């Protein structure tokens, strides 16, 4: 009976009929990470899922009149990148800041602000950075010491405060609205160590040197927040342009979840978000049960909690077992009281949430492993998959514990190479070699290692982090303990199936196999085989989520 119905519909459509795919990719090199068929030429998707992986001939019969067919022209297709740890709203907010590095002159700055005002909420703060009057092709008129007067800027943005940071970071430019909100007038005195640049009459022209920039603080504080829906869409656009199909948000508020749920309902949220909630124990106790959500519209999952046990290495905030080499009086900071971390672990167990703790220093990691170990023991055997976010600097004794306990190391390849040049100064050569970004040692212990960027701390670009993972090449041309580098396949796994595992989603994501979500990233170069030095020049050709092309690179 079922067969007969299919045949009738097939003939009615004149082609593949009911079986027709929504999307077919063919003539490519598809690296699936699926052991039963590691490499394929073609893939077909229908209703958001993969329905065929094989040769061009295999998918031919699935092409109907409505099927979108993409000729990959030999390009590499991989399972969609999963950003394992970044800050979703932060990525969106960073896109709202105007990049003024390459403007030709002041008129161009004013024009960019005018465009931004047209898209902003009433009263919303407009920010930008990177302007430099010495780089402009002409001197603004009028000017004071080559610095522009705010009049043109204030005219295009009468109601929105505007604050533009100089390329050096040592000066700021404000419009009249920002100065008004900050209470700055001709009568405002220069602060110590700073100067309000003034015209001949003594009125501020809009430029603030050094500490005077701090006078604008009240304008920042009183400005309206950007529309959160717009911020969400900007982050999504940015992620899609970098080939990311799923995103683990390392610290969201309950209100973010409410917003995103609505955007799933509207069909606007197309990226798949795996949300770590950041809240205090009292708020968690009150809300965890009601907010637990798995695969809402195949887009939104809330089953994870994030806490930071320490800070960052660069600011001596990472919590170490022994003092810093370059700050012997300090061993770093414990930023969330241990009793709160323990209580959060208890709440996570009670409500069936994963617990993800930011730990960078070896002491922070040891304390976290101890808390996890006790929580696991108290709860009895189970599939918990708790994660340590960053796991950057480990004592050698603690490395095997990741594998033994089944604790996931959620790391960021690109942090290794951007921090690499100064890690040695902070913790010395022995601790660096034994414990800094020890991906191979961790994998050797049986631990699952994930990847990501911690954007907007770093660019959200998976290619850059993937390249750092396989090369450990730093900007200074040296490699950071290259024996810890990942192979290209290990790096790909860290960005796909391992991240899926880190979200309990390995059944639906992370490899390209029939029945899984049709999330695919197509790259312009075969990063599995090209010269290592060529990898950073790789671009995204297509980003595909649920069989829908959500991003196509230039010329496609
Ligand atoms: Zn982070």
Image (cartoon, grey):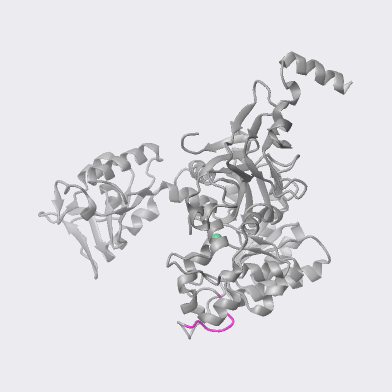
Q: Quadrant of ligand 1?
A: bottom right
- Specify the quadrant of the image occupied by residue 508: top right
Characterize the magenta stretch by its predominant secondary structure.
Answer: loop
- Residue 322 forms part of the magenta stretch: yes
- Residue 242 forms part of the magenta stretch: no
Quick one: which residue is furthest to the top in this view?
12
Q: Is residue 154 visible?
A: no
- Specify the quadrant of the image occupied by residue 548: top right
Residue at figure coordinates x 47%, y 43% from the top left: 227
Pinpoint residue 14: horizontal percent, then vertical percent: 72, 15
Q: Is residue 316 visible?
A: yes
In this picture, which residue range is highlighted in magenta? Answer: 319-325
Q: How many marks?
A: 0
> Quadrant of the image for the N terminus?
top right
Residue at figure coordinates x 76%, y 73% from the top left: 374
Residue at figure coordinates x 59%, y 82% from the top left: 321
Pinpoint residue 34: horizontal percent, then vertical percent: 73, 48
Quick one: which residue is furthest to the left in this view?
200
Is residue 184 found left or right of 37 in the rendered image? left
Pinpoint residue 151: horizontal percent, then vertical percent: 20, 44
Is residue 477 found left or right of 463 in the rendered image? left
Against 282, is 176 above or below? above
| Front residue (pair 423, 230) | 423
Quick one: which residue is furthest to the bottom in this view?
328
Against 170, is 92 above or below? above
Pinpoint residue 455: horizontal percent, then vertical percent: 51, 56
| Front residue (pair 505, 147) | 505
């Amino acid at each position: 009976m079922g067969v007969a119905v299919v045949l009738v519909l097939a003939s009615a459509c004149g082609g593949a009929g009911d079986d027709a795919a929504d999307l077919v990719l063919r003539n490519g090199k598809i690296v699936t990470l699926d052991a039963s068929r590691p490499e394929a030429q073609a893939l077909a998707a229908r209703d958001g899922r993969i329905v065929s992986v094989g040769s061009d001939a295999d998918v031919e019969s699935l092409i109907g009149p409505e099927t979108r067919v993409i000729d990959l022209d030999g390009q590499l297709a991989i399972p969609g990148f999963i950003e394992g740890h970044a800050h979703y709203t932060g990525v969106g907010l960073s896109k709202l800041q105007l990049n003024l590095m390459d403007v030709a002159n002041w008129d161009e700055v004013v024009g960019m602000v005018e465009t931004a005002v047209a898209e902003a909420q009433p009263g919303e703060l407009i920010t930008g950075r990177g302007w430099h009057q010495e780089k402009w092709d002409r001197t603004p008129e009028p000017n004071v010491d080559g610095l522009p007067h705010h009049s043109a800027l204030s005219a295009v943005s009468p109601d929105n405060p505007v604050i533009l940071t100089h390329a050096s970071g040592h000066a700021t430019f404000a419009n009249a609205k920002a100065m008004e909100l900050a209470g700055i007038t001709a009568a405002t005195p220069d602060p110590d160590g700073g100067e309000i640049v003034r015209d001949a009459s003594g009125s501020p022209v809009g430029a603030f040197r050094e500490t005077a920039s701090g006078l604008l603080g009240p304008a920042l504080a009183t400005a309206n927040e950007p529309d959160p829906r717009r911020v969400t869409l900007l982050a999504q656009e940015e992620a899609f342009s970098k080939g990311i199909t799923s995103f683990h948000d390392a610290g969201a508020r309950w209100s973010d979840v409410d917003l995103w749920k609505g955007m799933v309902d509207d069909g606007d949220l197309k990226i798949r978000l795996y949300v770590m909630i950041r809240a205090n124990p009292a708020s968690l106790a009150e809300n965890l049960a009601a907010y637990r959500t798995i695969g809402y519209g195949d887009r939104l999952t809330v089953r994870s909690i994030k806490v930071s046990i320490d800070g960052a290495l660069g600011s001596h905030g990472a919590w170490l077992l022994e003092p810093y080499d370059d700050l012997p009086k300090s061993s770093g900071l414990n930023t969330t009281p241990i009793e709160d971390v323990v209580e959060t672990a208890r709440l996570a167990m009670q409500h069936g949430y994963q617990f993800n703790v930011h730990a960078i220093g070896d002491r922070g990691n040891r304390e976290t492993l101890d808390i996890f170990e006790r929580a696991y023991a108290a709860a009895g055997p189970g599939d918990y998959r708790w994660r340590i976010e960053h796991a950057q600097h480990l004592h050698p004794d603690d490395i095997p514990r990741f594998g033994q306990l089944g604790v996931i190391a959620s790391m960021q390849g690109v942090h290794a190479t951007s921090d690499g040049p100064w890690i040695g100064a902070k913790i010395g050569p022995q601790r660096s070699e034994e414990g800094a970004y020890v991906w191979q040692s961790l994998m050797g212990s049986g631990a699952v290692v994930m990847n990501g960027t911690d954007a907007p701390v770093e660019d959200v670009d998976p290619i850059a982090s993937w390249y750092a993972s396989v090369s450990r090449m730093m900007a200074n041309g040296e490699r950071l303990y290259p024996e810890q580098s990942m192979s290209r396949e290990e790096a790909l796994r860290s960005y796909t199936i391992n991240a899926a595992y880190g979200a309990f989603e390995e059944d639906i994501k992370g490899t390209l196999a029939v029945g899984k979500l049709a999330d695919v990233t197509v790259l312009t170069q075969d990063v599995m085989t090209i010269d290592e030095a060529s990898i950073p020049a790789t671009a995204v050709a297509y980003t595909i989520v649920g069989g829908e092309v959500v991003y196509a690179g230039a010329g496609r």
